Image: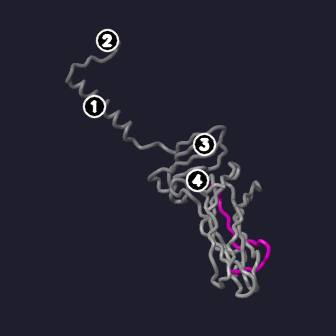
Amino acid sequence: MVANQPIERPKSQDFLVNELRELRRIVEEYTRASKFPFVVSHGGVVDFAVVPRAGADSAVVQVFDGTGKLVLGSDADVGYGLAQPFIQVPMYPTNPGLIFNSGGSFVSYYTGQAQQLNSCFLAQWRMNNSWGGAGAASVVESYVKITDSVTGWDWTSPTVTSPASTTTAPGVLTTCGPYAVQVPDTSIGNFIGVDIFSRLVSGGASSAVAVTPVSMLGTSKAFASPWLV
């Protein structure tokens, strides 16, 4: 017998009261609401956090990379992490109104920028080879380049060369990619600039090239792995 332990007779009033208290304690441990905000950090740098959402009716889970940069989140309001496993980079014409170009040097046709919150970047686009209607068959080329605006790191996709074409407008489409790259850890969280470059390699008078973005994504390595180059 333990000293000072109350003496309880089985099925007595005291026994039943204590059993109910123990049952309540167990139920509360399994059903009580989580206490947040809850933050795990080291040296003042947040590693993991559970914080209330704006309506305070649920919580947001956030995982950081050890330097304070967000790697994964579950907030559907802002659309990243678990709620959206990729970030679509909005792309805009570099020279508004310019659809086709007959220049022989690589120039940017589309440009865009977004925060790189994922470990990989994936690019896919289309290239339109429009023959001028006379002279040699037209051949066009295109590639994508991404640049970290903070560190200066960049990556250039393989250059895609179209088959020779003697088809006039609307021309012949060539799908480029998808191509993917794993970005450095130091680029996660930074703004990444994206440009689609293209040029006319050869062709008769009025031959030209146009491009259309299809997918410019910040995405996970698990999704991008089949197309890593």
Disc 1 marks which amino acid? Leu
**Residue 47, disc:** 3
The image position of residue 177, as x and y in percent, is 63, 64
Mark 3 vs 2, N-terminal side = 2
Q: Alpha carbon of mark 3 to alpha carbon of mark 4: how far?
A: 20 Å
- Mark 4 Cα shell of 10 Å, populated few (<14), some (14-19), many (≥20): some
Residue range corresponding to the magenta coloring: 98-117
Mark 1 → mark 3, Cα distance in angstroms: 40 Å
User: Gap in Å between the C-alphas at discs 1 and 2?
Assistant: 22 Å
Labels 3 and 4: the sequence-earlier one: 3
Q: Secondary structure at mark 1?
A: helix
Residue 87 rendering spot, x and y as whole percentages: 59, 60
Name the residue rendered at 66%, 55% in the picture: 229
Q: Label 4, label 1: how many angstroms apart (C-alpha)?
A: 50 Å
Q: Which mark is residue 220?
A: 4
Q: Quick check: 85 above or below 97?
A: above
Residue 167, quarter of the rendered image:
bottom right
Query: Which residue extends farthest left?
Result: 11
**Mark 1 — residue?**
20
Q: Nearer the viewer, mark 4 or mark 2?
A: 4
Mark in front: 3 vs 2: 3
Helix, strand or loop for disc 3: strand
Q: Earlier in the sequence, mark 1 or mark 3?
A: 1
* Foreground label between 3 and 4: 4
